[in-house]
């Protein structure tokens, strides 16, 4: 009997191939999870630092619009 007709050999080969595919999928999922975690961490740190910056730079302006250009200001800086 040839190996291609041997059912136990064929099942063993398919099981090994399935295990290899499963291991590869698991490693890809782990890499994706790590990438998502690092992006979430970076986003959280960026949001926190942006919030800290907003809190520190607040000088009683009007809702964050204090940086907008004043079109009606005179050339000497008076309003």
Image (cartoon, grey):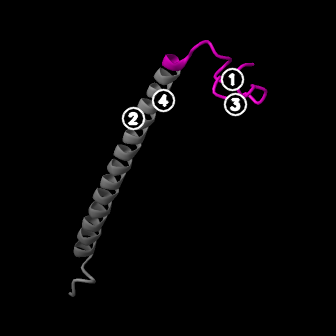
Q: How crowded is mark 1: few (under 14 residues within 10 Å), some or many (20 or more)?
A: few
Residue pictured at 49% horizontal, 28% vertical: 50
User: Residue 35 vs residue 77: left or right?
Assistant: left
The quarter of the rendered structure image containing the N terminus is bottom left
**Residue bearing mark 3:** 69
**Residue bearing mark 4:** 47
**Residue bearing mark 2:** 41
Sequence-wise, the earlier of marks 3 and 4 is: 4
Camera-side residue of 71 and 67: 71
- Magenta part, dominant SS: loop
Residue 18, given in percent of the width and then of the height, sits at 31, 63
Question: Where is residue 24, by image quadrant?
Answer: bottom left
As measured in the structure, the alpha-carbon distance from the residue carrying label 1 to the one carrying label 2 is: 43 Å
Give yes or no for residue 66 being in the magenta stretch: yes
Q: What residue span does the magenta drawing correspond to? A: 55-79
Q: Residue 77 carries which label?
A: 1
Residue 37, given in percent of the width and then of the height, sits at 38, 39
Sequence-wise, the earlier of marks 1 and 2 is: 2
44 w.r.t. 29: above or below: above
Q: What element carries label 4?
A: helix
Q: Nearer the viewer, mark 1 or mark 4?
A: 1
Q: How crowded is mark 2: few (under 14 residues within 10 Å), some or many (20 or more)?
A: few
Residue 35, given in percent of the width and then of the height, sits at 37, 46
The quarter of the rendered structure image containing the C terminus is top right
């Amino acid at each position: 009997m040839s190996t291609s007709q041997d059912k136990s050999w064929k099942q063993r080969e398919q099981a090994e191939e399935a295990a290899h595919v499963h291991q590869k999928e698991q490693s890809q999922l782990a890499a994706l999870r790590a990438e998502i975690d690092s992006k979430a961490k970076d986003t959280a740190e960026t949001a926190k630092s942006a919030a800290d910056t907003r809190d520190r730079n607040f000088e009683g302006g009007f809702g964050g619009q204090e940086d907008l250009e004043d079109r009606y200001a005179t050339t000497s800086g008076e309003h």
